[in-house]
């Protein structure tokens, strides 16, 4: 048995090569072994809950916790890492960090205004940190004292957010970190019997907290796990599988991505056979696929920070900060490749959303107010990719959109339709009465002429209509949405 496992590992190593360093890339070469804790389903989930998820397009991520108080600084020193990781920094005294909760009193926190802002931006779902790696709980957990209840603020933050986002019709997903620097039994890896004993207690605690969360907040639509790269967790295939099933039984249609349970060989995201574990691929963090092939035909989400790598509040953003045009492009690109785009917000220690985020949310919201039709309920259209931007197609109606980010100086936007599919009509989504000129160049190849006014500095959407074979590419239909 051991020998077989070794040979298997060797083959895996040789055939997958050294390039496999990302969190989740499907192994090139498929093998087929029987797994008890591998993928429990092949292909996409087709139920109504997952269809709702698939059609969100845009989501909001919230990272909030006691790390928002130091905001990436300690003792006048600048912490160059991600603000929510400051406790792990050598310049941060752990004791001081673990006592920050005694100052946690966000007087400006107003769940309703956060939810309204997210709705105005066009977010259809939100992922909220219930507990990040530091272990601080934003709900009054009965399984630890390290919670908001013991802070001067006292009140249940998750409860307020769930209520406020529910009221806005924004579906709530709970972020939960498997790493917990506060729990005495927590270990990143298990090196001794003592470690293992402690970790058993930690596993019970983890299970209890998750059951507690779904019991307290039954409108939760899914769980977004993090920190599951720990070697200790990678040994917990059986436990995590059973836990996942238990949680799924609590909430009909519960959605859990691929960053949760490992298979029995410790493979994450994709099991030993190369099949996706969980309901969608959860490895596109601060990066995106470039082609539909990169997605392996799976559902996926991309979670994105506004600066380079800051999730929690860092008072001093350095380096490139993304603009609304960049973020809108990422959103549309995600939708065009059958994914969701989730934009992160890191409120400060008082509960304010920072002004930069507020401005971007408003700019994205202004664009969505006009163009969201090309986002919601839309997915991939398997036409040749063009330099001007991205096609999206409504999964139900087949209505087809060109979202244009780069206008050529000629004003001629190339469209190549699939065989026997004629381009009949093109008009601006914003001004449906303005028909755009279409010129046929070769067979199946057309130019649509449109050059926006020089003052236009936002992407725009052209609706196109075809006749003949129809726009059905047979690809998005597979999802039965
Ligand atoms: C690394 C890491 C964590 N995963 C992101 C979603 C953030 O929570 C970051 O701290």
Image (tube, grey):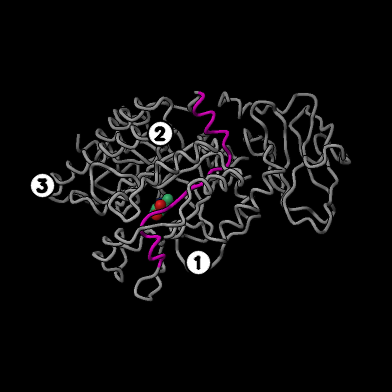
Q: Give the residue at x 65% y 26%.
A: 396
Q: Give the residue at x 27% y 30%.
A: 242
- For residue 400, the mark is none
Instruction: Tell me which corner region of the image, top left, top right, bottom left or bottom right, holds residue 476.
Output: top right
- The relative height of residue 299 versus residue 93 in the rendered view (above or below) is above
Q: CA distance from mark 3 to mark 2?
A: 31 Å
Q: Which residue is tagged 2? A: 278
Is residue 52 highlighted in magenta? yes
| In the displayed structure image, the side of residue 185 where residue 258 appears, left or right | right
- Which one is in front, 300 or 39? 300
Mark 3 or mark 2, which has the lower sequence index? Answer: 3
Q: Nearer the viewer, mark 1 or mark 2?
A: 1
Q: Which residue is tagged 1? A: 317
- Which one is in front, 235 or 376? 376
Q: Which image quarter holds the C terminus? A: top right
Q: Which residues are magenta?
A: 48-72
**CB at disc 3 and ligand 1 closer than 8 Å:** no
Q: Residues within 10 Å of mark 1 (few under 14, many from 20)?
A: some
Q: Give the residue at x 72% y 38%.
A: 401
- In percent of width and height, residue 320 lies at 56, 65
Name the secondary structure under disc 2. loop
Q: Which residue is tagged 3? A: 193
């Amino acid at each position: 048995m051991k020998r077989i496992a070794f040979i298997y590992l060797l083959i895996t190593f040789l055939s997958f090569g050294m390039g496999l360093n990302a969190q989740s890339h499907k192994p090139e070469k498929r093998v087929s072994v029987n797994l008890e804790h591998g993928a429990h389903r092949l292909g996409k989930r087709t139920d109504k809950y997952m269809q709702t998820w698939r059609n969100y397009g845009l989501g909001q991520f919230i990272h909030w916790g006691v790390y928002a108080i130091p905001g990436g600084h300690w003792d006048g020193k600048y912490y160059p890492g991600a603000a929510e990781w400051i406790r792990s920094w050598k310049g941060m005294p752990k004791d001081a960090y673990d006592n920050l909760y005694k100052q946690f009193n966000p007087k400006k926190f107003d769940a309703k205004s956060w939810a309204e802002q997210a709705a105005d931006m066009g977010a259809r779902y939100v992922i909220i940190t219930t507990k990040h790696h530091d272990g601080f709980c934003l709900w009054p957990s009965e399984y630890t004292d390290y919670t908001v209840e013991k802070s001067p603020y006292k009140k249940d933050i998750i409860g307020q957010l769930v209520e406020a986002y529910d009221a806005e019709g924004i579906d709530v997903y709970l972020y939960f970190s498997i790493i917990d620097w506060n729990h005495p039994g927590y270990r990143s890896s298990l090196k001794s019997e003592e470690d293992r004993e402690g970790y058993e207690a930690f596993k019970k605690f983890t299970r209890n907290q998750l059951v507690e969360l779904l019991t307290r907040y039954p409108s939760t639509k899914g769980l977004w796990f993090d920190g599951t790269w720990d070697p200790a967790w990678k040994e917990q295939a059986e436990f995590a599988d059973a836990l996942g099933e238990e949680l799924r039984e609590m909430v009909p249609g519960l959605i859990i991505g691929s960053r949760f349970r490992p298979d029995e060989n410790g493979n994450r995201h994709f099991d030993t056979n190369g099949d996706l574990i969980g309901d969608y691929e959860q490895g596109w963090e601060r990066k995106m696929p470039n082609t539909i092939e990169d997605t392996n035909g799976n559902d996926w989400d991309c979670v994105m920070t506004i600066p380079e790598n800051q999730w929690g509040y860092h008072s001093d953003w350095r380096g490139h900060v993304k603009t609304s045009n960049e973020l809108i492009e990422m959103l549309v690109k995600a939708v065009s490749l059958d994914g969701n785009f989730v934009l992160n917000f890191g409120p400060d220690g008082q509960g304010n959303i920072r002004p930069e985020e507020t401005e971007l949310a408003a700019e994205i919201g202004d664009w969505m107010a006009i163009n969201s039709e090309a986002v919601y309920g839309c997915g991939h259209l398997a036409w040749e990719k063009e330099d001007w931007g991205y096609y999206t197609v409504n999964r139900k109606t087949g209505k087809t959109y060109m979202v244009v980010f780069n206008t050529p100086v000629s004003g001629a936007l190339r469209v190549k339709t699939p065989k026997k599919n004629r381009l009949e009509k093109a008009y601006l989504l914003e001004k449906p009465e303005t028909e755009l000129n279409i010129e046929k160049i070769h067979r199946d190849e057309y130019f649509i002429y449109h050059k926006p006014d020089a003052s236009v500095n936002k992407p725009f959407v052209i609706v196109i209509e075809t006749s003949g074979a129809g726009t059905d590419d047979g690809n998005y239909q597979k999802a039965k949405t």
